[in-house]
Amino acid sequence: MKAEITGGEVSDYKGYDLVMARDLPPAKVFLADRGYDSNAIRADIEATGGTPVIPGRKSRKTAIVIDDYIYALRNRVERCFNKLKNSRRVATRYDKTEDSYLGFIHIAALRLWIKYFVNKT
């Protein structure tokens, strides 16, 4: 799991740069919400051979057509964040340091992962 902690006021554009700067394989499909709608992000994804599935902002002059079926899968990501926030410590960020907070996010994610495999068998 890869996670990066940013301030609450940081734009999604900044989050994109942090995630894509890591040594990860190029994404075949980049699924994101309107916060990531920019020509630069779309061009970067397409340059690496991926397909951006990002709805256009309402202020765009030309509408962006996306695959609604693939975009609906984003709901799974949102549900995962919701389950992580069921851990009150993640939702309220009681930890004083970034390292301890990120460590607890990893513990909460591991707990979800184990619960998933226990229920699957």
Image (spheres, grey):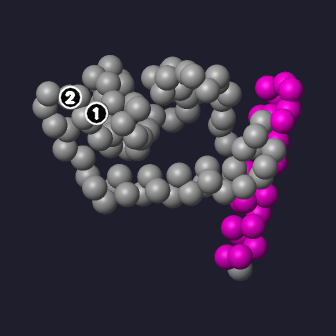
Residue furthest to the bottom = 121
Secondary structure found at label 2 = loop
Observer able to see residue 21:
no
Q: For the point 75% across and 67% down, which residue is it?
A: 115
Secondary structure found at label 1 = loop
Q: Position of residue 107 (x, y in %)?
A: 81, 48
Query: What's the residue type where badge 1 is placed?
Result: Arg
Instruction: Tell me whether circle 2 and circle 1 mark residues in contact (CB < 8 Å).
Output: yes
> Would you call the spot at circle 1 few (<14 residues within 10 Å), some (14-19), or many (20 or more)?
some
Observer able to see residue 71:
yes
Q: Is residue 34 left or right of residue 111?
A: left
Q: Is residue 96 above or below residue 76?
A: above
Label 2 belongs to which residue? 60
Label 1 belongs to which residue? 57
* Of residues 70 and 26, the one drawn nearer to the viewer in this rendering: 70
Cα–Cα span, label 2 and label 1: 6 Å
State which region is magenta: 94-120
Q: For the point 67% across and 42% down, which residue is it?
A: 1
Q: Position of residue 42 (x, y in %)?
A: 31, 28
Q: For the point 65% across and 37% down, which residue is it?
A: 2
